[in-house]
């Protein structure tokens, strides 16, 4: 291959040089060049074409190349059809015509067909001989390229095969010049690295495809190779098209005669698949070792004629050994066999070799520490072409725990049978594709069956079930396949002697759901005695006068008597299994849980006494007031609690009527006291406020009758008028007071406090501006009240007017009015910074008629009296808090507002 390349490269360098050599004439009329020998060696011929005669003159070499007789002269039109295709002929004619017309030389390669039929490749070069801008003749060279073309094609084909082989094998070769640090890559490697084909590239271009953590490994390998002049093979990773590949590199360090390194030639192979296979193999071996370790198992291999076993490390660990080598002498392992099992082991070995079969066998071994293990062996025997044992592959498994577990199971089965017998219970199982129900021995005894453990068919079992319960049992078994669930139920069986037993099937049934219901396992208990006691207890429970529930620890209802069913509207079936919470409103859930927990922490009879009333809820959602009494109920299955719920609806109704009567009585008492107080005030007014003016009036009349002059009579008459005016005012006030106290039909309206205050400001506008008073209100908590409009407006006017009238002359009046809402009751607060009052001294006369506490010309003692009278007439109340020099606050409670005030 190398020689072919060199030859092609050499010719390629020679041709351009030859085409420039001068052509001379020889004496024998042949064309020669100064390098004729060189022409002959290179098979290069000379020819001329006379333009005027259209004749080609060929030298001997050209004739030889074209397969023509020596000295041949060819006319252009008479030339044989050398061209393989018309396309090449046309192309050559075009080049020739362009040369003759324009003097442009050409150099081209043409495939020709000789007269003898041989296909050849030639290179034709031609130039023009021009005189006075006219081409007289054309001189040219013809070189035979056939051998070179063959060599070139062969080389190309071999390169293709090499590249294909490299691609298939994941190979690529390269050459590194450590002096220039340039690398020349093969075509396959250039394609993978996306570099220019067969062009040297810097080493850094190669390294950029290698992960950073592997670059140093590659550099060190090259440095060591240069240092030791011996290449060290290694594996590195390469990132190609985003994929991580593993590359194995081998190489050779080339040196010259003096031992100097010329280059390093290397081959890189993609071993990703091998690496991944090796990783998978290591993982599988690890999993096998792990599986053997978890299964307490080890494998061994024996070759006929040898005295050793090839054993896994896990197998050696079973014997308490930790050998570095995996081959162990058979004699050494036999030393561990328990003395009592040694004979059986020898017999088993002889039997296996004679029968050429390795059956399952168990034996004991004694470890060095005295610990005894039970091993189970099995395996395969492989025979040669002569039906003789060639090798045996087997396993040892430590079944010590399994044997102990089997012993434990046998013991537990014995205890289970004993427990079933004591508990009058038995277990059973059946498969969906089999009509047979297999029963435990104790369950067969319950059914009165003398069986052998083979079970009975479902139809045979149904024949022993009470006729009234037979369809129920059939239905329950049918629902298992449909719903893949099982619920507890009871049924009766009839024995051969006519006795009837009641059996219970709990819902603790194991159902195999693989691809539907394939197998059902459950238990069945004889509860004949318990059922009789339950019926007796139920009759006793139904005779109780109050609703009673039996509840378990999980708050589920186990039993409910008829009174409970009647009061709450549920049937017994609807209540059983339900939580007691079902009968409580949600707000009492914590109470019910607390009662249950408290009882089980102290299981005694307990009467529930809560600060608030306890309610339960019937099926219609109606709440029923109850008194709860809890009591313990001891059963074979454990402690239960009895809930006795006494309906106290009538008691609550009677209590409500009593409380209402009490409230009415208290209200009447308060009204009587108020009326008595008003009568006392009225009596006081009539006694003092009317008697004095009347006595004064009688005295003035007597003086008037005895007066002698008109002047005296006129003066006395004026005094009579003043006394009469005061008397009239007092009488009008008393009349208004009586109207307020007796008027029960005043119209109640929904009024806005803000609007009433605004109207009051308009009425008292002049006085507010005159005094410079500022009013502040806060009715954000409640603005609307139900009240008598006249009374509410009179209240605002009287109290605000009093704050203006009895202001402190040293400061501007500040009046604050606000509303509060508490428990459906509206309270108004009127506060000022006026003169204030000494309530310790005058408080008992604050709301009496004609009682004044300041020397004010307009003070008459009527406003607060009328305000109090009006408020109390509609069930309200007014109180005052005052301090001299700081101000007064009036607190008014309005009792006639509606609950939807807001």
Image: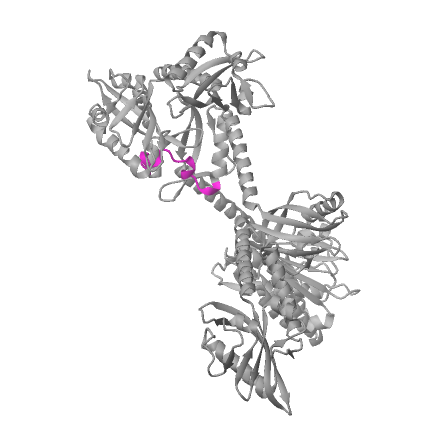
- Image point 47% across, 39% down: which residue? 588
Instruction: Between residue 502 and residue 173, name the one nearer to us.
Output: 173
- Seen at 53% across and 66% down, the residue is 146
Verify whether residue 572 appears in magenta. yes
Quick one: quadrant of the N terminus? bottom right
**x, y (%) of residue 683?**
59, 54
Is residue 517 toward the left or the right of residue 803 in the image? Answer: left
Relative to 126, 811 lies left or right = right
Where does the image place residue 279, in percent across and percent down from the top left? 56, 39
Q: Quadrant of residue 882?
A: bottom right
Taking the view exactly as shown, the residue that stands out farthest to the right is: 810
Residue 819 vs 115, above or below: the answer is above
- Any magenta on residue 363? no
- Figure colour scheme: one colour
Front position in the image: 810 or 63: 63
Q: Nearer the viewer, residue 42 or 383?
A: 42
Q: Is residue 637 above or below residue 851?
A: above
Residue 761 in percent (x, y) is at: 64, 70
Q: Of residues 170 and 772, which is closer to you in this image?
A: 170
- Image vertical order of residue 890 relative to residue 492, above or below: below
Q: So how many labels did they put on this image?
A: 0
Q: Is residue 363 left or right of residue 23?
A: left
Look at the image and tell me whether residue 827 can be seen. Answer: no
Q: Is residue 826 visible?
A: yes
Q: Position of residue 360 (x, y in %)?
A: 40, 19
Q: Quadrant of residue 394?
A: top left
Segment tinted magenta in the rendering? 570-587
Q: Is residue 456 left or right of residue 827?
A: left
Q: Which residue of the protein is positioned furthest toward the front in this rendering?
A: 28
């Amino acid at each position: 291959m190398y020689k072919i390349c060199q030859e092609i490269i050499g010719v390629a360098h020679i041709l351009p040089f030859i085409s420039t050599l001068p052509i001379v004439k020889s004496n024998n009329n042949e064309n020669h060049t100064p390098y004729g020998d060189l022409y002959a060696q290179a098979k290069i011929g000379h020819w001329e074409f006379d333009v005027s005669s259209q004749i080609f003159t060929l030298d001997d070499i050209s004739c030889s190349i074209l397969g023509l007789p020596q000295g041949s002269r060819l006319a252009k039109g008479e030339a044989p059809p050398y061209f393989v295709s018309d396309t090449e002929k046309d192309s050559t004619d075009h080049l020739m015509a362009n040369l003759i017309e324009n003097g442009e030389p050409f150099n081209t390669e043409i495939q020709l067909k000789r007269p003898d039929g041989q296909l050849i490749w030639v290179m034709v070069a031609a130039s023009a001989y021009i005189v006075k801008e006219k081409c007289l003749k054309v001189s040219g060279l013809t070189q035979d390229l056939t051998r070179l073309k063959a060599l070139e094609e062969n080389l190309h084909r071999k390169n293709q095969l090499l590249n294909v082989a490299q691609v298939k094998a994941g190979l690529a070769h390269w050459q590194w010049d450590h002096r220039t640090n340039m690398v020349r890559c093969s075509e396959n490697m250039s394609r993978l690295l996306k570099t220019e084909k067969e062009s040297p590239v810097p080493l850094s271009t190669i390294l950029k495809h290698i992960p950073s953590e592997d670059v140093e490994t590659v550099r060190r390998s090259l440095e060591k190779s240069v240092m030791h002049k011996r290449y060290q093979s290694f594996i590195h990773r390469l990132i190609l098209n985003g994929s991580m590949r593993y590359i194995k590199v081998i190489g050779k360090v080339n040196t010259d005669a003096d031992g100097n390194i010329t280059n390093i030639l290397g081959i890189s192979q993609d071993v990703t698949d091998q690496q991944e296979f090796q990783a998978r193999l290591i993982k599988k071996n690890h999993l096998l070792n792990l599986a053997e370790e978890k299964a307490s198992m080890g494998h061994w291999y024996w070759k006929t004629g040898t005295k050793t076993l090839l054993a896994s490390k896990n197998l050696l660990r079973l014997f308490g050994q930790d050998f570095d080598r995996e081959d162990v002498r058979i004699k050494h392992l036999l030393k561990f066999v328990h003395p009592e099992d040694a004979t059986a082991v020898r017999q088993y070995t002889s039997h296996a070799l004679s029968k050429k079969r390795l059956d399952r066998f168990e034996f004991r071994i004694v470890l060095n520490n005295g610990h005894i293990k039970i091993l189970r062996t099995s395996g395969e025997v492989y025979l040669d072409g002569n039906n003789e044992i060639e090798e045996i592959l087997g396993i040892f498994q430590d079944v010590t725990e399994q044997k102990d577990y089997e012993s434990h199971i046998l013991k537990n089965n014995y205890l289970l049978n004993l427990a079933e017998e004591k508990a009058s219970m038995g277990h059973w199982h059946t498969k969906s594709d089999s009509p047979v129900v297999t029963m435990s021995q104790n369950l067969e005894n319950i059914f009165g069956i003398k069986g052998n453990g083979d079970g009975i068919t479902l139809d045979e079992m149904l024949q022993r079930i009470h006729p009234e319960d037979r369809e129920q049992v059939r239905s329950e078994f049918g629902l298992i396949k449909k719903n893949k669930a099982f619920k507890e139920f009871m049924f009766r069986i009839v024995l051969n002697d006519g006795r009837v037993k009641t059996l219970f099937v709990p819902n603790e049934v194991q159902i195999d759901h693989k691809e539907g219901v394939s197998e059902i396992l459950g238990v069945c208990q004889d509860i004949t005695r318990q059922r009789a006691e339950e019926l007796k207890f139920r009759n006793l429970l139904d005779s109780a006068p109050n609703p009673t529930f039996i509840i378990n620890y999980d708050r589920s209802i186990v039993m409910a008597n008829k009174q409970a069913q009647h009061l709450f509207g549920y049937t017994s079936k609807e209540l059983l299994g339900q939580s007691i919470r079902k009968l409580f409103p949600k707000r009492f859930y914590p109470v019910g849980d607390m009662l249950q927990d408290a009882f089980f922490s102290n299981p005694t009879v307990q009467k529930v006494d809560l600060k608030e009333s306890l309610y339960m809820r019937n099926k219609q959602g109606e709440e029923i007031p109850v008194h709860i009494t809890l009591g313990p109920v001891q059963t074979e299955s454990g402690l239960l609690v009895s809930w006795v719920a006494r309906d106290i609806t009538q008691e609550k109704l009677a209590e409500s009527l009593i409380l209402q009567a009490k409230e009415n009585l208290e209200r009447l008492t308060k009204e009587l006291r108020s009326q008595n107080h008003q009568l006392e005030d009225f009596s006081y007014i009539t006694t003092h406020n009317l008697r004095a003016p009347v006595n004064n009036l009688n005295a003035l009349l007597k003086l008037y009758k005895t007066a002698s002059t008109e002047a005296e009579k006129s003066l006395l008459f004026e005094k009579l008028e003043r006394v009469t005016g005061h008397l009239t005012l007092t009488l009008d006030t008393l009349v208004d007071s009586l109207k307020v106290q007796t008027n029960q039909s005043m119209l109640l309206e929904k009024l806005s406090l803000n609007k009433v205050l605004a109207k009051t400001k308009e009425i008292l506008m002049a006085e507010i501006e005159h005094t410079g008073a500022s009013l502040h209100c806060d009715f954000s908590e409640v603005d609307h009240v139900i009240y008598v409009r006249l009374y509410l407006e009179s209240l605002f006017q009287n109290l605000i007017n009093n704050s203006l009238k009895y202001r402190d002359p040293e400061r501007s009046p500040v009046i604050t009015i606000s509303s509060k809402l508490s428990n459906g009751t509206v309270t108004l607060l009127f506060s000022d910074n006026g003169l204030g009052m000494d309530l310790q001294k005058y408080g008992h006369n604050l709301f009496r008629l004609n009682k004044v506490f300041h020397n004010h010309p307009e003070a008459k003692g009527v406003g607060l009296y009328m305000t109090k009278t009006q408020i109390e007439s509609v069930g309200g109340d007014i109180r005052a808090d005052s301090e001299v020099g700081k101000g007064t606050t009036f607190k008014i409670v309005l009792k006639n507002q509606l609950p939807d005030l807001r």
